[in-house]
Image (cartoon, rainbow, N blue to C red):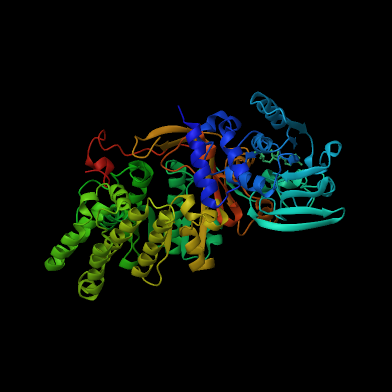
Amino acid sequence: MTNFAELRRQMIEHQMIARGLRDEAVLNAMSAVPREAFVPSELVEFAYNDAPLPIAARQTISQPYIVALMTSALQLKSTDRVLEVGTGSGYAAAILAQIVGQVFTIERHKILADSARDRLQELGFDNVEVLFGDGTRGWPSQAPFDAVVVAAGGPDVPEALLEQLAIGGRLVIPIGSEMHRQSLLRIRRVSEDDYQQEDLGGVHFVPLIGTSGWQEERSRQSTKEPVTVTLAELIYQSSEHFGSIKEVNLDKLLKRIGNSRLVLMGEASHGSAEFYEMRARISQELIEKKGFNIIAVEADWPDANYINHYIHNTSPDPLLETAPFSRFPTWMWANKSVLKLTHWLRDYNLTVAENNHSVGFYGLDLYSLNSSIEAVLNYLESVDPETAELARVRYGCLTPWAKDPAVYGQLMLTKQYKKCEKDVLATLRDLLKARLNYAHADGQRYFDAEQNARLVTNAERYYRTLYYAEQNSWNQRDQHMFDTLQSILSFRGKNSKAIVWAHNSHVGDARSTQMSARGEFNIGQLVREHYRRSAYLIGFGTDHGTVAAASEWGGPMEVKQVQPAHIDSYERLCHNVATDNFLLPLTKPIKPALRKRLLAERLERAIGVIYRPESELQSHYFYACLPQQFDEYIWFDETRAVEPLNRETSKGVLETFPFGF
Ligand code: SAH
């Protein structure tokens, strides 16, 4: 049984008090109202999360802190009569009802109004009246109100609400010219026709829809033009449709990519075959027709390096202790689609005469602490045994945890163990100092060792800060990936051109997603900031089908059903388009009207190596602005799970080479 009282206590402490909210009446009300009774039953476990949650009719129950902040901003007295616009779940109304004598609340969705009324009654709130209707007109028969609070964002303050305020009354309302971003205003009626206004800061509410709010139609697209075609029709007209990955004609895509030096390709899950196969097709054309010579992927350096040796027909040095990609999640790279590409790359490299035209395969990620340490030591032993000895001692600080570095991160919290930062940095410095000596003898091997030493340095920091909320380990990881990409580009020379394969969440510009509000950036953003128009970002999406994923970190791979996309998502919109597979140019749209109409934020789904369909909305969706996030979006209405290479059951080495032993 979940201990909701304890969760409530933690919510008050971590979300309210920690943010400086000290209003005692509000804190008492928040401790008294069972928020779990106001959220959909499948989301009960998330009821006290520091976030809004979806409820029926595509609406949300506000984040607890926002409810507290708004209630506190109303400066209530116990005798006040309060009007709320936007009942939603009824949660905020219940909080108000704990504090004041009488609450009137209006909701424009009948289903929400009815269920909130029942819920409040069941919970014994007999001082709340719920009305189904348009709250932008207020509730004239009950006016004046000592306080009015609006839980949805409109373009202007509705006149009716100002009129229905008592003298001395307060109106708290989010107002903004964009549909999903507002400033929270507090307006005080000082006298019959004198109002004072304060700005309480930026907020993010669902739109206020009504006579003095946004128009219903326009909530989908914030333009004033008459709507003649639906958005799904416009996408249909603005996209290149195709039947199969084998046959798709990519000429126009290649034209749009133009002279870009970088092409970043995402994926909406780590386990859907179509995303891999389409990226392989596009990569092959970029290699053959535009001279791209780098494929850099969201995998660890040593594993990818193993593949790099395979496709160059050279022997890996040092040999990995285990087969490449044997760390969880194995299917992400050890799958049939990737295997096919490595064979193609090997054949392709046989046809190129000059070394700098051959295609290299590289890993951008930093989870291979153990094998990277091994790789650095092996390299040093072969070129400089004395330095190798010293490096072994220095890395000794980390080796007890190298196989399970998260433990190192946890131990660092206790401050009883020695931090290994200086030791790992010293090894990297030694390598860099000797760069000229080592590198001229063997550029490729030196480069490999240097990248491994950088990986160890960054991984040490990544794990050390993993458990500190204020230090953002996501950013460290993406910064490492971007820095690695930069190193590869410079190693491969000034004419080098790179293709990146990573999840949409790394590749799509973070500034146009909810990530940015958390202070997170990603490779897509860093690449755009550095390379501007010389980078082309491609996102991928799907509606339904199967996906390879685990239920928890480290768990076994399962083939799961992908749920049909959420009604308020870009995916649902694409599903409604009258064709199954398409390329949708966003930066250079086929129909210029498209971009503008896609701008209003919607939900977007991200399935990683874990997929939990049961709590999909909470764990896999976030808000984004698609046409700003990517230059192009590639859609497969239905997708199927990747086929993992099964080392245990495959008949022999050859079948899965270079992945198996
Ligand atoms: N206070 C709510 C938050 C609901 S979100 C809670 O605690 O759960 C905002 C709600 O405002 C949505 O349910 C939406 O349907 C409603 N809404 C939007 N425009 C409205 C209008 N003009 N009149 C009444 N309700 C409106």
User: Residue 474 occupies which quadrant of the picture?
Assistant: bottom left
Is residue 71 toward the left or the right of residue 388 in the image? Answer: right
Identity of the residue drawn at 48% across and 68% down: 530
> Split into 4 quadrants, where in the image is the C terminus?
top left
Apparent side of residue 101 relative to residue 517 in the rendered image (left or right): right
Between 260 and 138, the one nearer to me in the picture: 138
Place of residue 348 in the rendered image (x, y in percent of width and height, measured from the top left): 34, 57
Residue 267: give x, y in percent of width and height. Answer: 47, 48
In this rendering, the answer to whether 342 lies above or below 493 is: above
Of 516 and 335, nearer the camera is 516
> Is residue 354 visible from the viewing direction of this image?
no
Number of marks drawn: 0
Q: Nearer the viewer, residue 108 or 552?
A: 108
Residue sitting farthest toward the bottom: 436
Q: Does residue 273 sit above or below 503 in this rendering?
A: above
Point out residue 519 in the picture as x, y percentages from the top left corner: 50, 57
Quadrant in which ligand 1 is drawn: top right
Q: Is residue 525 above or below residue 467?
A: below
Residue 552 can be seen in this image: yes
Rendering coords of residue 386 (x, y %): 12, 68
Quarter of the rendering occupied by the N terminus: top left
